[in-house]
Amino acid sequence: MLLDIGPKADGTIPAEEVTVLKELGKWNQKHAEAIFGTEGGLPAGYFYGPSTLSKDSTMLYLFVPGNPKGQVMLGGIKNKINRIYVVGNGTKLSWKEYLKPYWSNNAGLFFVDVPDAVLDEYMTVLAVVLEGKLKIQK
């Protein structure tokens, strides 16, 4: 990752850049489970933001940029969702699935309620606990 932080001529790092590094370190520590030991998440079009996946493919992490204004949409997931929580504080979130045809294996659309009170200052991360390994609609 390129942070564009460099030392001054005397070798010291400017105070504002030290602040950026410290804040990044705190954010990384708070969201470590979604960053370290994970792999690439969903392909484009399933969720409108970055995502990662646990090594065993049973935990999906959604990186929610900005304020989603109450809901996040997740599509193409065929698995049953056991639980969704906010990484870093553990708040359990509610969700509903829509447009899932009962007569087929096609995936529906999940809408996750994300109240303003749980939003992270920089980027909120949601953990989606799946039943079994991730299966997506192709």
Image (tube, rainbow, N blue to C red):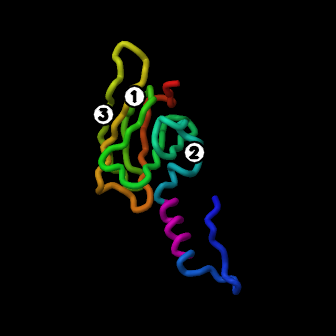
Residue range corresponding to the magenta coloring:
18-29
Q: Which residue is mark 3?
A: 96
**Would residue 40 be found to the left or right of residue 74 on screen?**
right
Q: Earlier in the sequence, mark 1 or mark 3?
A: 1
Q: Secondary structure at mark 3?
A: strand
Q: Secondary structure at mark 2?
A: strand
Tag in front: 3 or 2: 3
The residue located at (57%, 51%) in the rendering is 36
Q: Is residue 136 above or below residue 14?
A: above
Q: Overall secondary structure of the magenta stretch?
A: helix
Q: Residues within 10 Å of mark 3 (few under 14, many from 20)?
A: few
Q: Which residue is mark 1?
A: 80
Picture coordinates of residue 11, whole percent (x, y): 69, 83
Tag in front: 1 or 3: 3
Q: Earlier in the sequence, mark 3 or mark 2?
A: 2
Please state which amino acid type lies under the numbered disc 1.
Lys
The residue located at (44%, 33%) in the rendering is 130
Q: Secondary structure at mark 1?
A: loop
Q: Indicate whether residue 43 is drawn in magenta.
A: no
Q: Is residue 81 above or below residue 68?
A: above
Q: Which mark is residue 35?
A: none
